Amino acid sequence: MSEVKSNRLNIYAWVFVVLILVIIVLFQVEKKNYRITHPLFTTGVVTGKSSVAKGDQYLDYSYSVNNISYKGSVPIKFCLECSDSCCTIGAKVKVRYAKGDPSNSDLIH
């Protein structure tokens, strides 16, 4: 009987983990949708490239809104979309950010 109870607890734990992951994904999608539907634009500067533990690379940039500095990053594949002309350190880039939340940003070409 305790084995059945243990299996049931394992199933509940997996359901809980999946539910949390779905919530996180939905939050990220909503954040991106808000940035797209309520955009403001500014000019930023490429500050470098970085890597994460899995080996994925990102293009780092900084920008300023209302005299407050922000930093962001986008996947390095962005460089393929802009023909690498915007990926050198110091290059000027167009930053799209969400109205009311300048930290919610990405780059556009």
Image (cartoon, rainbow, N blue to C red):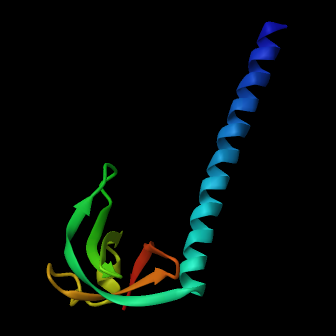
Instruction: Give the residue at x 62% y 70%.
Output: 30
Quarter holding the N terminus is: top right
In this view, the residue farthest toward the front is: 67
Give the percent coordinates (x, y) of residue 42: 35, 89
In this view, the residue farthest toward the right is: 1
Left of 54 or right of it: where is 47? left
The quarter of the displayed image where residue 60 is located:
bottom left
Q: Is residue 7 above or below residue 98?
A: above
Quarter holding the C terminus is: bottom left
Q: Is residue 67 above or below residue 11?
A: below
Give whichever of 95, 109 is nearer the camera: 95
Left of 103 or right of it: where is 70? left
Q: Is residue 32 above or below residue 109?
A: above
Instruction: Give the residue at x 34% y 70%.
Output: 72
Q: Is residue 43 above or below residue 54?
A: below
Instruction: Give the residue at x 65% y 62%.
Output: 26
Give whichever of 65, 82 is nearer the camera: 65
In this view, the residue farthest toward the top is: 1
The quarter of the displayed image where residue 37 is located:
bottom right
Give the percent coordinates (x, y) of residue 77: 34, 76
Count up the numbered dots.
Answer: 0
Left of 23 or right of it: where is 12? right
Instruction: Give the residue at x 55% y 74%.
Output: 32
Give the percent coordinates (x, y) of residue 17: 65, 40
